[in-house]
Amino acid sequence: SPTDENAHDPVINASVSGDNVKDSSNPELSTGTVSSNSETLDEHVKSAEGKYVALDFSSCVEFVSFFDDNISSGRVQLYDWQKEVLESLSNAKPTEQKPHKFALCACNGSGKDAFVIAPFVVWFAACKIKSLVIITSSSGVQLTSQTERYIRSLADKINTWTSTNLGGPIFKINQRFIECTLTGSQIRLFATD
């Protein structure tokens, strides 16, 4: 109901375009290393035919652990419920005709934006060809100050890493619109207030 403390929490709709294009032979994508762990990005780049390339991380948890030093170092630990939600979202199979619609009810300050929404939407954009994530909230202030801030932060971390290791950023970040140039995917945020 509108009087609930979570009434302004964002709602996520995610879908993948019907043309799941595969590959692009981009020689720059064969050179990455990560200082915080022993994996390389090479192990996570899906080769495909065509214009776009998707990163190959099987789950949001694996993805955020790879790119977020706070999580990979153990300074920040995801709660079991956050991991379970991320795994559930990772295993969903949305299509253009049947997008995956998801609403999460959790206490204020529980990490919904930072540790569920941001990792999922950035993973989805980087790991799915021509995907579209739409996030809506009845509060423009919350959308800008919380949800978008955490999404931008994770996308910036990935851009910093890819700029250093692959020669350039993969996310174009604008207010309430983020695009992954590697996959052609988009994240759009709308306030309904």
Image: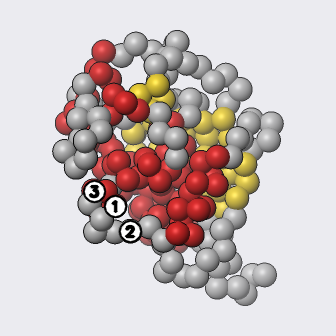
- Looking at the image, which is closer to me, 76 or 124? 76
Image position of 165 (left or right of 55): left
Q: Considering the image in quadrants, where does the C terminus appear?
A: bottom right
Measuring from the top left, give residue 110's x and y in whole percent: 51, 77
Quadrant of res 70 = bottom left
Name the residue at 52% across, 41% down: 58
Q: Which residue is mark 1?
A: 71
Name the residue at 41% across, 52% down: 64
How far apart in space, not on screen, are marks 1 and 2 (Cα)? 6 Å
Are dots 1 and 3 in contact, CB under 8 Å? Answer: yes
Measuring from the top left, give residue 176's x and y in whole percent: 50, 53
Q: Which residue is mark 3?
A: 69
Work out whether mark 3 precedes mark 2 in sequence or the reverse, and give the earlier one.
3
Name the residue at 23% across, 35% down: 33
Q: Which residue is mark 2?
A: 77
Mark yes or no: residue 157 visible.
yes
Q: In the orientation shown, which residue stands out farthest toward the front?
A: 38
Measuring from the top left, give residue 39's x and y in whole percent: 30, 39
Mark yes or no: residue 181 visible.
no
- Looking at the image, which is closer to me, 40 or 68? 40
- Looking at the image, which is closer to me, 83 or 7? 83
Label 2 residue SS: loop
Label 3 residue SS: helix
Q: Amino acid at mark 1?
A: Ile
Q: Nearer the viewer, mark 3 or mark 2?
A: 2
